Image (cartoon, rainbow, N blue to C red):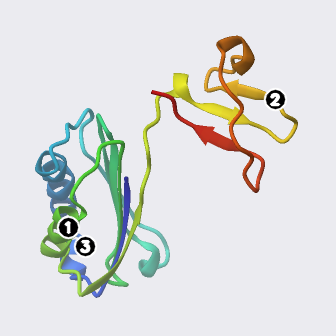
C-alpha cells in the first residue's frame, strides 16, 4: 500500500520544526504496527528562494519507508508512506493533521500486492513465458495464461 498525502494550509511554524517532523517519523511506524529499521533522518534545505526551502525527513521501516517534505513559506507538505503491509491510512492522515495543522489535503492510495516472485508468471507478446526467476514455464509444467491487451499476463499460483 502506498499512501500519498499532499497537505495545504498547514501551520508554517510547525512545518519549519525539525522536532515536529522527527516526532511524526519516530512515532508513526509504531502507531501502524510497523518497525523502524533506521534512525529518523531530517534535513533542512536552505536556498536562495524561501518558497523552495523546507525540511525533508524519512525513516526506513521493515515494511518499506515513510517520508515527508515541507515548504513552510507555502504552507505545504507532502508525505509518502509505502508499505508491503496494509495499514490504516486514517491513522496517518490524522497524525499529519494534528502534527502540522493541515487545513485541507489530497489523499491518494495506491494498492500494492506483494507477490511471491517464485510463483509469478509472465507471458510476453513473443510467446516466451518465464516465471519471476526467469525459468522456462514449460520446464516447470506451468500453463499458458490468457492474453491481455498489452500482451503481458501476471498469474499467481497456490
Q: Residue at x 19, y 54 (%)?
A: 22
Q: Earlier in the sequence, mark 3 or mark 1?
A: 3
Task: Look at mark 1 in the image and give the residue it sits on.
Answer: 90
Numbered mark located on residue 128 in the image = 2
Dividing the picture into quarters, in which one does residue 23 lie? bottom left
For this orientation, the residue located farthest to the top is 139
Marks 2/1: CA distance?
43 Å
Rendered view: 149 above or below 40 = below
Rendered view: 35 above or below 58 = above
Query: Could you tell me how many numbered marks the image carries?
Result: 3
Q: Residue at x 53, y 22 (%)?
A: 118
Q: Earlier in the sequence, mark 3 or mark 2?
A: 3
Q: Position of residue 9 (x, y in %)?
A: 28, 88
Circle 2 Cα neighbour tier, 10 Å, few/some/many (<14 / 14–19 / ≥20): few
Label pair 3/1, CB-CB below 8 angstroms: no
Q: Earlier in the sequence, mark 2 or mark 1?
A: 1
For mark 1, give the secondary structure: helix
For mark 2, give the secondary structure: loop
Rendered view: 115 above or below 135 = below
Dividing the picture into quarters, in which one does residue 154 lie? top right
Task: Look at mark 3 in the image and give the residue it sits on.
Answer: 15
Q: Position of residue 45 (x, y in %)?
A: 40, 62
Viewer-nearest residue: 126 or 114: 126
Rendered view: 108 above or below 127 = below
Viewer-nearest residue: 10 or 89: 89
Amino acid at each position: 500500500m502506498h499512501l500519498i498525502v499532499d497537505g495545504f494550509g498547514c501551520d508554517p511554524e510547525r512545518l519549519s520544526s525539525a522536532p515536529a517532523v522527527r516526532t511524526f517519523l519516530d512515532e508513526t511506524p509504531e502507531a501502524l504496527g510497523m518497525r523502524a529499521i533506521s534512525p529518523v533522518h531530517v534535513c533542512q534545505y536552505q536556498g536562495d528562494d524561501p518558497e523552495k526551502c523546507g525540511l525533508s525527513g524519512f525513516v526506513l521501516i521493515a515494511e518499506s519507508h515513510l517520508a515527508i517534505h515541507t515548504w513552510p513559506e507555502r504552507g505545504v507538505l507532502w508525505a509518502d508512506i509505502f508499505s508491503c503491509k496494509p495499514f490504516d491510512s486514517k491513522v496517518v492522515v490524522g497524525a499529519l493533521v494534528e502534527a502540522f495543522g493541515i487545513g485541507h489535503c489530497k489523499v491518494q492510495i495506491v494498492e500494492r500486492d506483494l507477490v511471491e516472485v517464485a510463483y509469478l508468471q509472465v507471458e510476453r507478446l513473443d510467446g516466451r513465458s518465464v516465471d519471476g526467476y526467469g525459468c522456462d514455464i514449460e520446464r516447470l509444467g506451468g500453463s499458458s495464461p490468457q492474453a491481455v491487451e498489452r500482451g503481458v499476463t501476471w498469474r499467481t499460483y497456490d
